Image (cartoon, grey):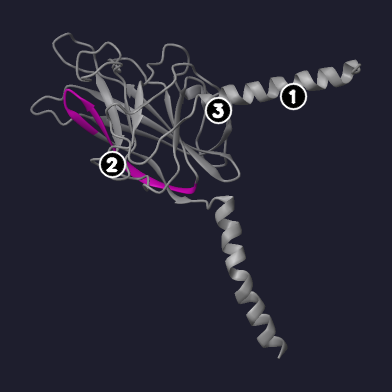
Amino acid sequence: MRNLSSVWRSLALAMIVVASTTAQAAFRPLPSPTPETPGVALDLNTLGLTGTVLATLDSPFVDNAVPTPFAQGTLRSLVVDRGGGLLDVYYQLVNTSPPPPDLVSEFYRLKTIGGFDPSLLLSVAQTNSLSGLVAGAGSGFVAGNYVTGGALQPASTADRDVGTIGSVGFDFPFQRPAFIGDANNVQAGESSSFLVVRTNASQFGSVRVSISGAATSFANSFAVTTAIPEPGTCVLLASSLLPLASLVARRRKS
């Protein structure tokens, strides 16, 4: 008969495995290319993510409607080192439009204009909590400055639009066609959930983002630039260099 301590250890291990599986289940692989329709469905449940914030950016924007803009907002972005130098990019869309009934002031989509090389391995998720993030030196991150909680508007799908190489997009409506008038859009005064792009990259740069509503808006944000090689790639590279190293050693010895 197994003693009680070994039983508890087994139970604890099982709970850790289940918790890890549950957390990972919220991330969905995002192959390249993935068309906008139907895209990759995002889980509606939220999860707490951890990491060190390396950089933050708030980019206000106004749509390009002429003569009068329909909507305005702020795109909030974070670059997070989740460990081992691997980066996650967070986006939150905040609709700061005034809500008069005669104006259409909602957003149904955001999309980076490039910024993510098709060779990158990406997965996507969303969360309504930043409690697991800590501020890196000089990042400017203050968790209390962000809108969090259950009132955030979740996205429905993500994609790597075949029409724009290197893009990552998020749609909010849960039915197609997805345009103005859907209750799931980010309405005036609302904020989206934090839309997370998990990458195998180690460096980041800047990118332009288009925001779709009754008209189109543009904001500045972050994207990643350099992928860390997979472990198997490193082993293969090392093994391919062994004959060269051996030859150099023999020549030096002679």
Q: Nearer the viewer, residue 28 or 172?
A: 28
The residue located at (33%, 36%) in the rendering is 34
Residue 24, labelled with which disc?
3
> Residue furthest toward the top?
101
Dominant SS type (magenta): strand
Residue under the image location 30 percent in, 18 percent down:
186
Q: Which residue is mark 2?
A: 113
Q: Quarter-wise, where is residue 58 in the image? A: top left
Q: Count neighbours of disc 3 (C-alpha within 10 A) and say few if under 14, some if 14 to 19, many if 20 or more.
A: few
- Helix, strand or loop status at disc 1: helix
Q: Earlier in the sequence, mark 3 or mark 2?
A: 3
- Side of 221 relative to 202 (left or right): left
Which quadrant would residue 192 be assigned to in this image? Answer: top left
CB of mark 3 within 8 Å of CB of mark 2?
no
Which quarter of the image is occupied by the C terminus?
Answer: bottom right
| Disc 3/disc 2 C-alpha distance (Å) | 27 Å
Asked if residue 205 is among those painted magenta in the image, a careful observer would answer yes
SS class, disc 2: loop
The magenta-colored residue range is 201-217
> Tag 1: Cα neighbours inside 10 Å, few (<14), some, or many (≥20)?
few
Relative placement, left or right, of 169 versus 136 is left
Closer to the chain start, of discs 3 and 1, is 1
Disc 2 marks which amino acid? Ile
Is residue 25 located in the magenta-colored stretch of the structure? no
In the image, residue 50 sits, relative to residue 192, either above or below, namely below
Q: Looking at this view, is 181 or 122 the one in front?
A: 122
Query: As drawn, is 171 to the left or to the right of 3?
Result: left
Which mark, by number, is residue 13?
Answer: 1
